Image: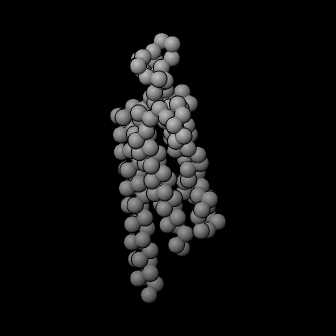
Amino acid sequence: MWGILDIPTSGMIAQRIRLETVAANVANSKAILDADGNYNPYRRRAAEFAAGDPSASTGSGRQMGVHVASIWIDQNALRAMHDPSSPYADADGNVMVPDIDPIAEQVNAMEAARGYEANVAAAEALKATMAQVLRLLA
């Protein structure tokens, strides 16, 4: 009976990962160097969801819910910025920088937050329903 809570829980986990991905995009929107200090502009990432929840506690729960199948990296999410003074500029004086739209990321963050809230509401409704069933059985 408690396995039914795995469904909204999987949704909350997936939306949390999605929100973390959005936060990483915003935080790295100006990053052109990787962790080793090499020129490697940050590329936008997106969480891809898939049906089912491999971490569910029951067999039926594993068939329901959602999980993050992968974090997709957009290799084309770069734009040229004219900065001839940069040591990373090409012959035309352009530096490739991350092409991350803060408005689109804000919309993605709001969608993830609303999805998380919807799963919390579903979990609360399930808990209230189960409490009612237990009261009736007692």
Residue in the image at 55% along x and 69% along y:
3
Residue 62, quarter of picture? bottom right
Residue 85, quarter of picture? top left
* Placement of 52 over or under 73, stated as above or below: below
Residue in the image at 35% along x and 34% along y:
103
Here the colouring is one colour
Q: Residue furthest right?
A: 59
Q: Is residue 114 left or right of residue 10?
A: left
Find residue 27 and report its horizontal and vertical position in percent: 40, 41
Name the image quarter holding the C terminus: bottom left
Find residue 32 and report its horizontal and vertical position in percent: 47, 32
Question: Camera-side residue: 111 or 59?
Answer: 111
Find residue 72 and report its horizontal and vertical position in percent: 56, 39
* Placement of 5 over or under 44, stated as above or below: below
Q: Residue furthest bottom?
A: 138
Residue 131 seen in the figure: yes
Find residue 87 and report its horizontal and vertical position in percent: 47, 23
Residue 22 seen in the figure: no
Q: For the image shown, how many numbered marks are present on the structure?
A: 0
* Placement of 40 over or under 48, stated as above or below: above
Residue in the image at 41% along x and 77% along y:
131
Residue in the image at 38% along x and 50% along y:
113
Question: Camera-side residue: 66 or 44?
Answer: 44
